[in-house]
Amino acid sequence: MNRRTFLKSVGLGLAALPLVRQWAVAAEEAAVGGKPNIIFILSDDVGLDDIGCCGSDLYKTPHIDALAKTGMRFEYSYATPLCGPSRCEILTGRYPFRTGLVSNQSANAVSPAKEIMMPTVMKKAGYATALVGKWGQICLGPREWGFEECLSVKGSGRYWASQKVEYTCNGKTKALAADEYLPDLMHNFLVDFITRNQAGPFYVHYAMSHVHGPIMRTPDSKDKGAKAADLYADNIAYMDKLVGKLAAELDRLHLREKTLVIFAGDNGTARQAGDRSTLNGRSINGKKATMLEGGSRVPLIANWPGTTPAGVVSRDLTDFSDFFVTFAALGSAPLPDGVKLDGQSFAPQLKGQKGQPREWVYVELQGKSYVRDSRYKLTNGGEMFDLRDAPFREEPVAKDTADTGAVASRKRLQEILDQHTAAPRAEGVPPKKKQRQKKKNAKK
């Protein structure tokens, strides 16, 4: 396009401006209308009671809080309450009963022949793609699922070489050196990727190590002999520090206004630390791996300066199937043909529009499931709960209640459950307890 054609395309309203200003305005308009870079930060075992802006009483997260202050925080975001199914739902946009990945032991239920993951879709829209961090509860490696570049580690809670940590960097397996801290290595890989791809657009799935156990010292920990419970705050602080360092790099590269940064937890707080933490002075009902509010309701913060409205706390319902269609919408990426997707895009809300908020969310784990709306929750076991005081209490609602609102909600929620049949644990896979016992017996 020559200069004359370009100026004409941005509107006659520019004509009254000086030439330099005309080009500046045109460039700004093009950036606003273009495809954003997307960095999806998925923290590990981080619940509402771990994040300052969500109401944590014990932990300070100033950098994550800053993302919320200059962006949006979603009050009602729902994950699967365990990491494997949760991550698969994010990357496929499909509920566990559709993919078959219903537990951490059912990784082989999915394959690229059956499922299409987000990097494949985003690449078709011109995105460079990268996976940084945890990858283990889904079969094969991130490259087989469409990620062009990756630094991945199998398993959870990997930090230091003393844990015999191996990681894979773009197809090459390496051992973590004695003086290396894996989260720092992951950060450096991420910064290198976005620096090389700063012309954009790029999409990054950043699966952090923090704060999954075992809880170990961080490079900033002063007491190297402290117990895990005392080091937990150090790990929260270091996770927050890495988020701040990433934001600073985006500022350095002048990419903040072009980049959507999402911060989320993959499931509720783990028991090892969750017993101590409180939210606004109260304990959350349920932890990771439970079908209670504390197992599934997680932090979700979106920051895209100049686009996301600043300081907004949204009460719209979202669940983890929504990221697939939301990112595709923002990137003008074509959705896969012939695939039943469960997500509902919240891209309009990220742009300050009303959009079409969800009326319900669905949560499933190993044969158990529930669906909830803005007030009530109904399980596939027939139990109904009033969630007015959630995430602290879930008040049972009797089947013979005279409350006409509750009766109508039960009927509506049951119709949704009837269309979402929770899948049992993968065939032939014993529960974790039995697996551990088998390993102990084998050692004897």
Image (tube, rainbow, N blue to C red):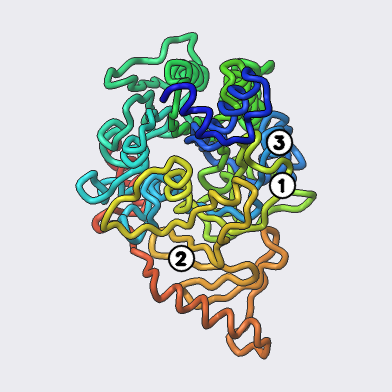
Mark 2 element type: strand
User: Disc 2 and disc 1: Cα gap in Å?
Assistant: 30 Å
Looking at the image, do the residues carrying marks 3 and 1 touch, with CB atoms under 8 Å apart? no
Residue at the image point whose x is 53% and y is 49% from the top: 347
The crowd level at tag 1 (other Cα within 10 Å; few <14, some 14-19, many 20+) is: some
Most foreground residue, 120 or 388: 120
Q: Disc 3 to disc 1, how far (Cα)?
A: 9 Å
Examine the rendered structure and indicate whether residue 291 appears above or below residue 108.
below
Q: Position of residue 77 (x, y in %)?
A: 58, 53
Q: In the drawing, what numbered circle is on residue 312?
A: 1
- Give coordinates of residue 225: x percent, y percent: 63, 19
Residue 115 relative to residue 246: left or right:
left
Q: Which residue is mark 2?
A: 369
Picture disc at residue 70: 3
Quarter residue 410 falls in: bottom right
For the N terminus, the image quarter is: top left
